[in-house]
Image (cartoon, grey):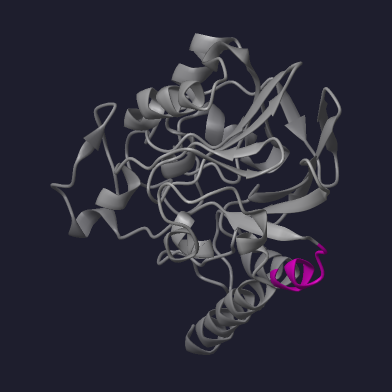
Amino acid sequence: MRLILILLFPTLCFAQNNLLPYYDSAWSKSYEPFRIAGNLYYVGTYDLACYLVATPDGHVLINTGLAGSVDGIRQNVMTLGFQFEDIKILLTTQAHYDHVAGMAEIKKATGAKMLVHERDGQVLQDGGRSDFALKNVSGSFFDPVQPDRLLKDGEIITIGTTAIKILHHPGHTKGASSFLITVQDESRPWTVLVANMPSILTQTRISGMPSYPEVGRDYKYTLEAMKNIDFDIWVASHASQFKLHEKRKPGDPYNPAIFSDRPLYEASINSLKGEYDRRIKSE
């Protein structure tokens, strides 16, 4: 998520009566829901990726986008033939407003349990007030959400016969996480990585910050760890990060293999490592 210093943009749009540090119109633009692989579906907006893991025992929703995206997510879930109220678990790749601002409303509407990595728990509870990069900005960025369970790296979340493994990839937020999910379609199983790509915020100092002294160490760990993940296909927190709109056009048939782009994944990690190295040298 790109964040621009709030003092430079004092008149940007509001969400839930809170001033957003940055807003991109692609975040609110609608996009048709579709089946990615097996029981994993895309239900987000044009750029803010939200994922539904659908099972007969209830569903998991990963990310919500902005507060204004909730009605669109609800409609996308229903368009796919599922019941919105059957969402039982809420997850997020990062506790930033462009990925969690709809959590409070969806949690209330569905009664779903909110699970988040333990290092993003406080940020979720206070609506972003304690975010290490934005904590000096008055006010919150999204409606606070009380986590029902705090997760640790490597934990497995199960619903029905589907298992979701959390991979802690800190840096972008303290609790930023990716997820590994194995799904099955009519022909084969697919191991899917929902990747939280470790982009570096404008405000982040890799050499360390009072509110996050170990941020540089965490980024270094994440960049190394993400190189070694085995998967069949991958998607990410933003559609633009895995080039969804180049790979798939509205109405295209089911084709999980279009998301198997390992070269793009490795190039993206290498590019982020290059930015990390540049930031270290310049600080």
Question: Is 98 placed left or right of 226 in the picture?
Answer: left
Q: Give the range drawn in magenta.
A: 223-230
> Which x, y percent locates residue 259?
62, 61
* Quadrant of the rendered image containing residue 32: top left
Q: Which residue is drawn at 62% across and 54% down?
A: 255
Closer to the camera, 7 or 44?
A: 44
Question: Is 92 placed left or right of 55 in the picture?
Answer: left
In this view, which residue lies farthest toward the bottom?
281
Question: Is 190 placed left or right of 61 in the picture?
Answer: right
> Which x, y percent locates residue 59?
67, 23
User: Does the stretch in magenta take in 146?
Assistant: no
In this rendering, the answer to whether 71 lies above or below 15 is above
In this view, which residue lies farthest toward the left?
11
> Which x, y percent locates residue 2?
39, 60
Q: Main secondary structure of the magenta part?
A: helix
In this rendering, the answer to whether 250 lies above or below 51 is below
* Quadrant of the rendered image containing residue 181: top right
Closer to the camera, 139 or 164?
A: 164
Q: Which residue is drawn at 44% across and 66% down?
A: 246
Q: Using the rendered image of the protein, determine whether residue 249 is visible from the camera's viewpoint.
A: yes
Q: Residue at x 30, y 41 (%)?
A: 28
Q: Using the rendered image of the protein, determine whether residue 22 is visible from the camera's viewpoint.
A: no
> Which x, y percent locates residue 51?
58, 39
Q: Residue at x 69, y 51 (%)?
A: 178
Quadrant in which the N terminus appears: bottom left
